[in-house]
Amino acid sequence: MMTVKILGTGCKNCRTLLENTRKAVRKMGIDADVEYITDLEKIVSYGVMKMPALIINEKVMAMGKVLKPEEIEKIIRGI
């Protein structure tokens, strides 16, 4: 099972990335656990300097961008 985490502070961009990620995962029919993390200590542990950030299987895949569902699908296919 794939683990997907969105790191953010709760801002509009972070929530948009979360929703776009959920759309991409649903569309692809992937068995994935999508989690939204706002705890700053956990965010810092990933070394992320810009938010929102997309983490897939514990690897930072994007940060500081609100990706579209299609862009997220492309990242997932590349794994």
Image (cartoon, rainbow, N blue to C red):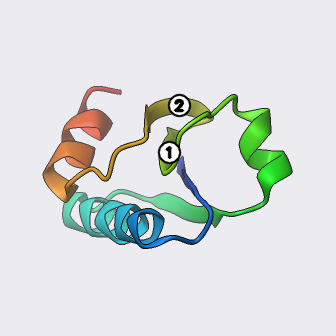
The residues tagged by marks 2 and 1 sit, at their Cα atoms, a distance apart of 7 Å
What quarter of the picture does the C terminus occupy? top left
Q: Position of residue 52 (x, y in %)?
A: 48, 51
Q: Which mark is residue 4?
A: none
Q: Position of residue 61 (x, y in %)?
A: 44, 32
* Residue named by callout 1: 53
Q: Position of residue 62 (x, y in %)?
A: 41, 35
Is the C-beta separation of discs 2 and 1 under 8 Å? Answer: yes
Residue that appears at 69% across and 28% down: 47
26 with respect to 53 (left or right)? left
User: Which kind of residue does numbered mark 1 sit on?
Assistant: Ala
Along the viewing direction, whichever of 46 and 32 lies nearer the viewer: 46
Query: For the image shown, how many numbered marks are present on the structure?
Result: 2
59 with respect to 77 (left or right)? right
* Residue named by callout 2: 60
Residue that appears at 31% across and 53% down: 66
Can residue 1 be spotted in the picture? no
Q: Position of residue 35 (x, y in %)?
A: 59, 63
- Circle 2 — which element? strand
User: Looking at the picture, does residue 8 appear above or below residue 3?
Assistant: below
Residue that appears at 34% across and 45% down: 65
User: Looking at the picture, does residue 78 appear above or below residue 26?
Assistant: above
